[in-house]
Image (tube, rainbow, N blue to C red):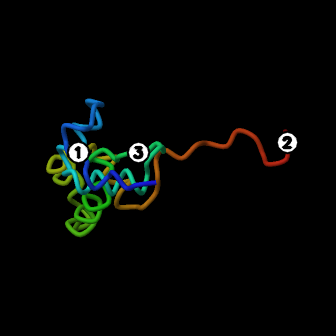
Amino acid sequence: MANFLEFIELDDIKNDEQRALAQVIGIEAYIRLVKQYGGTNVYVLKEESLTKSIRDDKIKKEFNGRNYQFLAKKYNLTEQRIRVIINGSDEYKQIRFFEEGCL
């Protein structure tokens, strides 16, 4: 089968969403995506998810033992969320209602 991908131009992409993606990342990168992931579902992270660990590291470095309120205001988070980040625990862990093996 001939490799027609080398001849693809932006106007050849008929699907509006796919064409918009190619415009954002460039046709060469889009062709690489097609070759690597064509026919599959690809999830793209939200900006917040991508940068969360960097934000959390900055908060930990800036923490002086007492500045929960300052950091909460600076990063637009609650003081409780700052405490969770500092303490390394996850406030969203699910509570176990049943012991293992009971069901």
**Badge 3 is on which residue?**
43
What is the x, y in percent for residue 53? 32, 60
Category of crowding for the residue at label 3, using alpha-carbon neighbours closer than 10 angstroms: few (below 14), some (14–19), many (at least 20): few
Kind of residue indicated by mark 3: Tyr
What is the x, y in percent for residue 28? 23, 56
Mark 1 to mark 3 CA distance (whole Å): 16 Å
What is the x, y in percent for residue 96? 67, 43
45, 10: nearer the viewer: 10
**Badge 1 is on which residue?**
22
- Dot 2 falls on a residue whose secondary structure is loop
**Badge 2 is on which residue?**
102
Kind of residue indicated by mark 1: Ala
Category of crowding for the residue at label 1, using alpha-carbon neighbours closer than 10 angstroms: few (below 14), some (14–19), many (at least 20): some
Q: Disc 1 vs disc 2: Cβ atoms closer than 8 Å?
A: no
- Dot 1 falls on a residue whose secondary structure is helix
76, 53: nearer the viewer: 53
Which residue is found at the position 16% from the left and 46% from the top? Answer: 73
Q: Residue 99: which disc? A: none
Q: Is residue 88 left or right of residue 79?
A: right
